[in-house]
Image: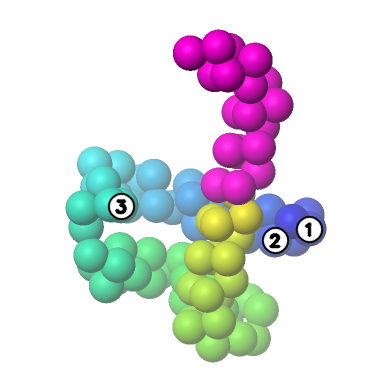
Amino acid sequence: MTAEDREMFNRIMEFADEAMPDIDPEKVRVSEQIDKLRPILQTIAMERSMPVEEVFIKYMDLATEHALEYEQKMKDDFGDIMSTV
């Protein structure tokens, strides 16, 4: 993830924490999540001169990448503990 990508991802995540603090992403439809994120997605799209849909797709890609990085970090940090259980 580039520094620019990380900055965009963090902006969206900060907005999401404020706009939908009590929403469980696994229980709320994606369309509802997109509606809540639309203001920040539109702002970033205008700043970068790209369609909102592309910003959302990029965000989803970055979220997946972030999740994989986190999972790998947990395995690296706690792999020994998990393998003995």
Q: Check the image and name the residue furthest to the front.
A: 84
Question: Image quadrant for the N terminus?
Answer: bottom right
In the image, which disc is placed on residue 5?
A: 2
Q: Earlier in the sequence, mark 2 or mark 3?
A: 2
Foreground residue, 44 or 80?
80
Q: Is residue 48 above or below residue 25?
A: below
What percent of the width, then of the height, locates residue 66?
Answer: 60, 49
**Distance between mark 1 and mark 3 Cα atoms:** 25 Å
Q: What kind of element bears circle 1? A: loop
In the image, which disc is placed on residue 25?
A: 3
**Distance between mark 2 and mark 3 Cα atoms:** 21 Å
Q: Are marks 2 and 1 in contact (CB under 8 Å)?
A: yes
Q: Which residue is mark 1?
A: 2
Question: Is residue 29 left or right of 77 when viewed as pictured?
Answer: left
What percent of the width, then of the height, locates residue 2?
Answer: 78, 58
Q: Earlier in the sequence, mark 1 or mark 3?
A: 1
**Residue 65 part of the magenta segment:** no
- To which quarter of the image does residue 47 belong? bottom right
- The secondary structure that dominates the magenta segment is helix
Instruction: Judge whether residue 36 can be spotted in this image.
Output: no
